[in-house]
Every structure is written in C-alpha cells, then in structure tokens.
Image (cartoon, rainbow, N blue to C red):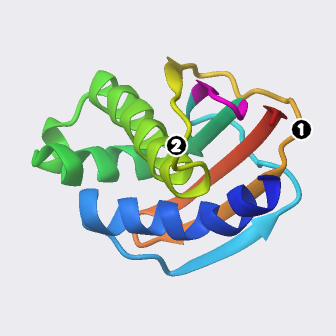
C-alpha cells in the first residue's frame, strides 16, 4: 500500500493541478521530507484503512495565484481567506485522487485542517512541484495499513 501511495502521489497531484487549477507542472521532484516555512499549510487526515495524513504547503504568492485561477477571480480580488480555503480544497482533492487510485475499494473518512503551522511529523512520500505560479509541496504519511 505504501508503495502504491508513493507511486501515485505525483501523477494524482499533476492531474488535479491541470484539470482543476488550469496550471501545468514545470518540474516534480521526490523529496525525503516536506519542506515548509511560512506560507499556507493545509492537511487532510484520512481514516480507512489505510489511515494517515496528506499535507500541502504553498507560499502565499503561489496560493494567491492558484486561488485566482480556481475561483475565477482577478488576482487583486483574492483575499487571504480565499487562499486558505483553496489550500484546504487543494489538499482535499489531492487526497481524494490519491486514495481512490491507491485503495479503490476502501471507504474513507476525511477531515480537512487549514493550519498555518506545518506539521513536523515524518512522511512516507513527499513531492516538491515547481509550477508557473511558484513552488508547492505535498507529503503523505501512512499511520496504519
């Protein structure tokens, strides 16, 4: 299961970014840890099995550009609340896509947490994306299979 999650993380995120946020991927690189600091953090706790957490970190500038695209607003119309909401929705969509590919027969309970403080717990799989809008980091931790 962990292998499936690791293999599917990047393709699932790329699909969501392209179809829901109308952006491309300039590069994607597997990381050993989720880098974060400042910016927007959102996480989705999932209980299945498997149980775990998916975390997203984006700088404010990247979050604002993605919110503008997703919400169909002019860049100057995007509020900080919009950015936080979109970061949570982004994490939710990434998690849903990943779990439906990696554990298609499981039923899940998802809990979204929009938190400005990055979680320092280790991850099983992390990907750092470079988008035209800026960097975005996604990490997944599986607690129980």
The 10 Å Cα crowd at callout 1, few under 14, some 14 to 19, many 20 or more, is some
Q: Residue furthest front?
A: 105
Q: Which residue is painted at 62% across and 65% down in the image? A: 8
Image: 20 above or below 93? below
Residue 138 image position (x, y, % from top left)? 63, 50
Residue 108 image position (x, y, % from top left)? 53, 28
Q: What quarter of the picture does the C terminus occupy? A: top right
Q: Callout 1: helix, strand or loop? A: loop
Residue 18 image position (x, y, % from top left)? 32, 69
* Nearer the observer, 5 or 118: 5
Q: Which residue is painted at 70% across and 56% down in the image? A: 5
Q: CA distance from mark 2 to mark 1?
A: 17 Å
Q: Which residue is painted at 50% across and 62% down in the image? A: 12
Image: 60 above or below 65? above
**Residue under pointer 1:** 122
* Nearer the observer, 35 or 113: 113
**Residue under pointer 2:** 95
Q: Is residue 121 left or right of residue 84?
A: right
Q: Is residue 74 left or right of residue 79?
A: left
Answer whether residue 48 is magenta in the image. Answer: yes
* Nearer the observer, 129 or 134: 129
Q: Which residue is painted at 60% across and 67% down in the image? A: 10
The number of numbered discs placed on residues in the rendered structure image is 2
Q: Main secondary structure of the magenta part?
A: strand
Residue 54 image position (x, y, % from top left)? 64, 38
Q: Callout 2: helix, strand or loop? A: helix
The image quadrant that residue 46 belongs to is top right
Q: Is residue 55 left or right of residue 131?
A: right
The 10 Å Cα crowd at callout 2, few under 14, some 14 to 19, many 20 or more, is many
Q: Is residue 118 left or right of residue 121?
A: left
Q: Which residues are magenta?
A: 44-51
């Amino acid at each position: 299961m962990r292998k499936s999650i690791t293999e599917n993380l990047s393709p699932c995120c790329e699909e969501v970014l392209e179809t829901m946020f109308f952006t491309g991927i300039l590069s994607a690189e597997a990381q050993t840890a989720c880098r974060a600091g400042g910016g927007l953090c959102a996480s989705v706790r999932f209980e299945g099995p498997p149980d775990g957490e998916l975390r997203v970190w984006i700088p404010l500038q990247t979050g604002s550009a993605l919110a503008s695209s997703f919400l169909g607003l002019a860049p100057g119309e995007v509020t900080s609340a919009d950015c936080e909401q979109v970061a949570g929705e982004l994490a939710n969509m990434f998690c849903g896509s990943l779990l439906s590919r990696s554990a298609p027969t499981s039923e899940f309970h998802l809990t979204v947490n929009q938190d400005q403080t990055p979680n320092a717990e280790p991850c099983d799989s992390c990907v750092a994306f470079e988008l035209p809008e800026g960097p975005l980091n996604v990490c997944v931790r599986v607690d129980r299979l």
